[in-house]
Image: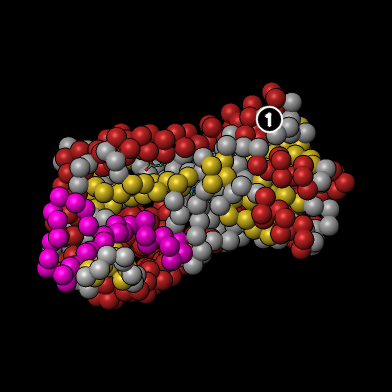
Amino acid sequence: MRQYGHFINGESVAPSGGQYFPTENPYSGETWAEIARGNSADVDAAVAAAKAVGEGAWGALTPTARGKLMRRFADLVFDRAEHLAKIEMTDNGKLAAEVVAQVRYLSEYFHYYAGLADKVESHVIPTDKPGVFAYTKYEPKGVVAIITPWNSPLTLTSWKLAPALAAGCTAVIKPSEFTSASMIEMAALFMEAGFPKGVVNAVTGFGQEVGEPLVVHPDVAHVGFTGGDAAGRRIYALAASHLKTVTLELGGKSPNIVFDDADLDQAVKGVVSGIFAATGQTCQAGSRLLVQDTIHDEFVERLIDFVKAAKIGDPAELDTQIGPVATKPQFDKIMSYIEIAKAEGATCVLGGRARPDIGAGQFIEPTIFTDVENSMRIAQEEVFGPVLSVIKFKDEEDAIRIGNDVIFGLAGAVWTQNLKRAMKMTDKLKVGTVWVNNYRATSFTSPFGGFKQSGIGRESGSEAIKEYLDTKCVWISSDLDVPNPFIRR
Ligand code: NAD
């Protein structure tokens, strides 16, 4: 069986505690590899390597030279995308049809930030103090911790790592314990691209054993986290006690809002892509369908007809549309929410059952609930699975009220052909991303992140690099006279 060590200071390293844990294929149920079980000693070694190279060979490179290395890495990721994607699919059951393109697309993130590396320009300040030349400088924060979930391991790592490297930081990554292997394989490509040893390190293992020591490590300056809100809160509290900066990308309960003037065929596809793509295991899932009461019954009928035809099965087959649930705990969580929804009085109009007959049985039918009130738990809490709550609304005001009435604010969409209505909705929805007549588009060019309890900070886009930089102001006096040292100039 394949065994993966940590990746520290440019090489594969056995765990200092000598322990490994199994990683499973959610489709077949088979254990296919063993992953190093890290501890705080492994974290210390990785942070020390990252710190040393940041102050040494990596720190000595010009931003242009950093960019060149990043471009080489970007090309390698593109070339090896199929291999990396196969590992992700084996670990989390995501569809081959989606994940190969997704991994290839990561090269764009590294190209984009490679280009940005030498375009972070500072300013000369037209200060009010005579005889002084003042300017700003942006400096890398230092060692960055990157902690990621299982649903899109390499994508969510790259959203943080590409701007961090462009900024001149070094990184220690802790991938999810369910999907560690792809990160270990990707880390090795940095060496092939010619990066100095220690710029990118990965320590595998569990949240408390690796994640927490990493967050509180005195030489880690910033924590970039994507995951659930419970772990997010814990990490935020730990980081606060050490006064570290964070970016947190957490969950959502995003409204997908369909007005009666929408192109309903397109809206059906948009709703499906929002909640049934990736088996609903995406942070931006449009898990609440808000549909105008005048078209409710017709729209739900069309939606059911479309979803009924979806092919559930082996994620490796290119025509599969719904794959397995990635982990057993997640499977149990989704099934428990289906029971909660029924107990709350929602009506299950499609699915609602597990499919023990497919693969190793970690499958759940695409599930639609109608008669959902926005106050129900099924409308308020993140399920992170193929479960859609359908809620009726009357008019724009009602849609805005219901759309915003959750603790989250990650994303939302509006389906309408009325431009004025679209503009009003984009203004009023309290979310970090609004799509109009589309769903689930993201890009390296465009900021992504949450309002309210969906997160802190932004990833992607040109401003994301600032999350990894500290601003320094330099004052140079050309006037050697210090008039009165007891009074501030
Ligand atoms: P999770 O929060 O359980 O784990 C995420 C990562 O944090 C894992 O690597 C885990 O080991 C680590 N971790 C857990 N506890 C920790 C602790 N105390 N200290 C340090 N690290 C700790 O999330 P998950 O179950 O892997 O992923 C699903 C969640 O991720 C969902 O809630 C989803 O909404 C969220 N998510 C958000 C986005 C986004 O961009 N907003 C994207 C994908 C997933």
Residue 313 belongs to magenta span:
no
Residue 472 belongs to magenta span:
yes
In the picture provided, is 355 more to the left or to the right than 271? left
- Whole-percent x and y of residue 289? 71, 45
Q: Dividing the picture into quarters, in which one does residue 252 lie?
A: top right
Farthest residue in the right direction? 294
113 vs 367: above or below? below
Q: Can residue 241 be seen in this snapshot?
A: yes
In the picture provided, is 95 more to the left or to the right than 420? left
In the picture provided, is 352 more to the left or to the right than 188? right
In the picture provided, is 241 more to the left or to the right than 89? left
- Whole-percent x and y of residue 63? 26, 72
* Residue in view at x 37 percent, y 38 percent: 236
- Whole-percent x and y of residue 290? 74, 44
Farthest residue in the top direction? 343
* Residue in view at x 47 percent, y 33 percent: 329
Ligand 1 located in image quadrant? top left
* Residue in view at x 76 percent, y 63 percent: 419
Quick one: label 1, few (<14), some, or many (20+) residues within 10 Å? Answer: few
| Quadrant of image for the C terminus | bottom left
Give amino acid for label 1. Ser
Residue closest to the eye, 86 or 435: 435
Label 1 residue SS = loop
Label 1, ligand 1: CB separation under 8 Å: no
Residue closest to the eye, 407 or 198: 407
Find disc 1 in the rendering and name its residue. Answer: 375
Residue closest to the eye, 142 or 392: 142
Q: Can residue 192 be seen in this snapshot?
A: no
Boundaries of the magenta span: 460-489
8 vs 480: above or below? above
* Residue in view at x 72 percent, y 49 percent: 257
- Whole-percent x and y of residue 194? 22, 71
